[in-house]
Image (cartoon, helix red, strand yellow):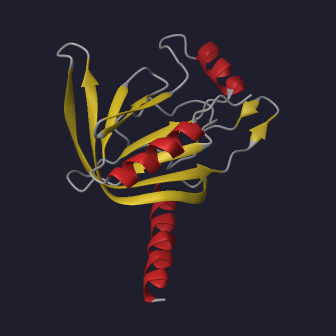
Amino acid sequence: MAESFSRDYKKELNFKITKTYDDKIKSLIYHLNHCKIYQFDNESSDWQFLSCQGPLVLYERELTITDDGYEPLGENEFEDGFDVNQLSGKDGYKYGLLVFNRLEPINFSLGISNDSAFIQKQMEENVESAFNEMKVDLKEELVILKSHLNEVFGIWIEETEEREAVYQLLKAFILKQE
């Protein structure tokens, strides 16, 4: 019973903390205590540690679709992520990934959506940069995630079960949504 209370308390606390970074959090889907974030460098063909490690949360977001498409991003949504251009313009990100960085005051965050209408709209509005479908893969100890902007991130998770759970959830999140 005490373990269940502790787990529920931790989930509620993670939800509240995540809400301070993203007002549109609808539900906390998964959380783990520790991961490290890497980015693939095409020039060196090697993984570079982004100086980001800590707890990871995966969550569903509440979206409002207006007459002219998705609503604009709110004030405190993802503004402190490593890649501030990842989430800009209209908000069509149904899921979020957030790592609370214990090394630096900048967290790592990605909006996740493969909604075909949203991607098409982003492609039309973002002429200066390509906007593509996300992809996910599992290689050894890394969950590999290719972002909408073709950046490749590796999420190192020590525990095999947690790594597999994150991979399966991300895979489900990015299945093509019509």
Q: Which image quarter is the C terminus in?
A: top right
Residue drawn where x is 49% and y is 70% of the image: 11
| Image location (x, y in percent) of residue 79 | 43, 43
Q: Residue furthest left?
A: 44
**Which one is nearer the viewer's eye here, 99 or 126?**
99
**Which one is nearer the viewer's eye here, 167 or 70?**
167
Q: How many marks?
A: 0
* Left or right of residue 133, residue 9 in this image: left
**Which one is nearer the viewer's eye here, 17 or 114?**
114
* Left or right of residue 153, residue 12 in this image: right
| Image location (x, y in percent) of residue 111 | 51, 39
Say above or below: 56 vs 145.
below
Residue drawn where x is 62% and y is 42% of the image: 94
Say above or below: 161 vs 9.
above
Q: Residue furthest bottom?
A: 1
Say above or below: 121 vs 77.
above
**Which one is nearer the viewer's eye here, 56 or 17?**
56
Residue drawn where x is 24% and y is 56% of the image: 102
| Image location (x, y in percent) of residue 50 | 23, 37
Say above or below: 147 vs 53.
above
| Image location (x, y in percent) of residue 120 | 67, 18
Residue drawn where x is 39% and y is 54% of the image: 161
Occupied quadrant, residue 127: top right
